[in-house]
Amino acid sequence: MRSVWGTLSGVVMVLSLVGAAYAQSDAHSSSGANAAVAREKAIDDLVTAYHVLYHEGIVDAFGHITVRDPANPSHYLMAKSVQPPFVTRADIVELDADSNPVSKDAGHVPLERFIHGEIYRLRPDVNSVVHSHAAAVLPFTVAKDAPLRAICHTCGFLGAGAPLFEIREYAGDGSNMLVQNKALGAALAKTLGQNKVVLMRGHGFTAAGGSVKEAVYNAINTVLDAKVEMDALRLGNVTYLSDAEAAAVSKTHNASLDFSWEVWAKRASGELR
Ligand SMILES: [Zn+2]
């Protein structure tokens, strides 16, 4: 009798273990399926974002946006070396944590991809990064006494001023100005710190966000802020947002990113003029 009970309890234990294993496998396949769906959505948003940034004058032939890979958060997704207005889903490639293409067939990838990879490494809260050479921002990357600060109510994320990355401190005074290796990417990410935007002397800027929509919003409004600040400085003394105002308007705008995104996306697709 004792041996029958022993056998029965053994069978029950095995069945329980098998059940638990099935449940675990279901959970894994379900989270895997969710990640796959999120990845497809991220690629859709990324392609749209390239077109939006081009149409809004933030990038031209150069400049890029990336998104952290929802299926593998240490990796990120980016268009290979294609001009932003021409990017399609077929151009999106996966890069690893060291900014190497995962596929051997990825083709040419942007030289400055290390900007993105090193920011993702340092900032777990950042899920999307834009790099731009927009001319309106350039004066603020070279003028020593005019920091780019939050000046209007859509630009609170700039706070008391975007930090400036001086590439000469890391690459000497004879570099090609491009952030084209891990060490320079890491130095840029460190300069960004906990900010949303970092200026790059004589080169452009990089904006970060918790989503593709936020990174695009921050990039577009960085350029807007630069234009408004430049005009205002021509008129004389300027009043900037206070720290509390900057924080308050950021909170409001982060809650309505979809609202702006819809207009930008439809304008980029030709649905709106
Ligand atoms: Zn660049």
Image (spheres, rainbow, N blue to C red):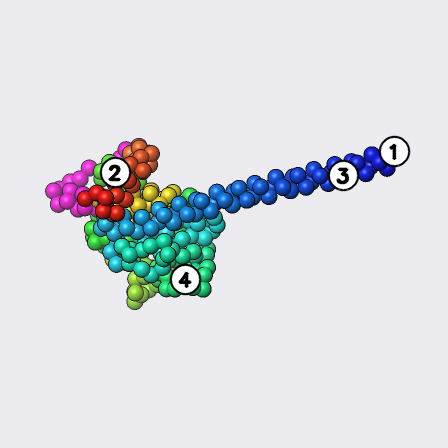
Q: Which of 177 and 71 is in front in this view?
A: 71
Residue 241 lies within the magenta run: yes
- Boundaries of the magenta span: 225-247
Q: How far apart are marks 2 and 3 (CA)?
A: 65 Å
Q: Is 125 above or below relative to 248?
A: below
**Residue contact at pointers 4 and 3, CB within 8 angstroms:** no
**Secondary structure mostly seen in the magenta stretch:** helix
Q: Identify the residue at image location x=13%, y=42%.
A: 236
Which numbered dot is residue 153? none
> Gap between marks 1 and 2, in whole Å?
78 Å
Q: Residue 190: in sight, yes or no?
A: no
Residue identified by numbered label 1? 1
Residue type highlighted by circle 2? Thr
> Of residues 91 and 172, which is closer to you in this image?
91
**How crowded is the residue under tag 3: few (<14 C-alpha within 10 Å), some, or many (20+)?**
few
Badge 1 element:
loop
Q: What residue type is labelled 1?
A: Met
Callout 2: helix, strand or loop? loop
What amino acid type is highlighted by mark number 3? Val
Q: Which residue carries the number 2 mark? A: 154
Any magenta on residue 230? yes
At numbered mark 4, what does the secondary structure look like: helix, strand or loop?
A: loop
> Is 230 positioned to the left or the right of 68 in the image?
left
The spot of residue 273 in percent (x, y) is: 19, 44
Where does the image place residue 3, in percent across and percent down from the top left?
86, 37
Local packing at callout 4 (Cα closer than 10 Å; few below 14, some 14-19, many 20+) is: some
Task: Give the amino acid at mark 4.
Answer: Ala
Where is residue 23 drawn, in percent x and y?
61, 39
